Amino acid sequence: MLLKNLEIPIILIGFMGTGKTTVGQYLMNQLHLSYVDLDEYIEQRESITIPEIFDEKGESYFRKLEFKYLNECINQFDIISTGGGIIENDASLDLLKKQKQVIWLDCDIKIVFNRIVNDPHRPNANNKSLEQLKNLYLSRISRYNEIAFMKVNSNQNVSEIYQEITTLLSSD
């Protein structure tokens, strides 16, 4: 499917485990556009994993790296999947506010919890209960909403999410 007058980049935001990477890769394949997962990009550029960055240098340092590489990727890729906490950094939030195609993938917190409960690659989810994760999610909702061009329910399968996104993007 070709979308006329598609503005890029398309930036996927949302809480961890809502499907940003899966949806980003699906959009890339269906629309034949370039794609990057920002977390993977950071790990490649820094030659260190995100959990290691959190452990060795802290979340604040990671958020600065995240902003640096988001700024770089905006000019290089058509589709960008961000990390769930990208909105925690004011500089990243301000940069995202200036983008036209920011899509918020939102998902039921119980589904998210089941997807990420034992994922060692998610430092902000390690050893957290459903209630703790829900509180983190609730602390981020207003920021996601503040910068989102559209909100898409990612409880559904990826082809349904794709249909919803492309319908919304083509109705501009």
Image: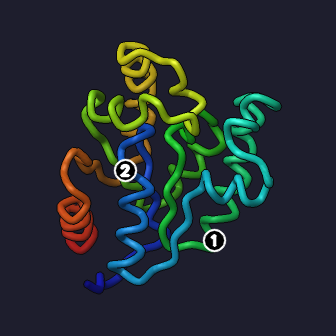
Q: What crowding class fits label 2: few (fewer than 14 Cα within 10 Å), some (14-19), or many (20 or more)?
A: many
Write down the residue under mark 1: 75
Q: Please give the name of the residue rendered at 66% of the width and 42% of the height, measured from the top-left corner.
A: 91
* Picture layout, residue 111 above or below residue 24: above
Q: Nearer the viewer, residue 21 or 151?
A: 21
For the point 71% across and 45% down, which residue is it? 49
How many numbered markers are drawn? 2
Give amino acid for label 1.
Asn
Who's the residue at 68% across and 42% down the image? 50
Report the amino acid beneath label 2: Gly
Q: Is residue 151 left or right of residue 21?
A: left
**Residue 153 shown left or right of residue 32 in the figure:** left
Distance CA(mark 1)–CA(mark 2): 23 Å
Which residue is identified by label 2? Answer: 19
Q: Residue at x 72, y 32 (%)?
A: 54
Task: Kindly report which numbered mark, 1 or 2, lies closer to the viewer in this rendering.
Answer: 2
> How many other residues sit within 10 Å of disc 1, few (<14), some (14-19) or many (≥20)?
few
| Nearer to the camera, 92 or 158 | 158
Q: Earlier in the sequence, mark 1 or mark 2?
A: 2
| Along the line of sight, the residue nearer the viewer: 127 or 79 | 127
Residue 19 in the image: x percent, y percent? 37, 50
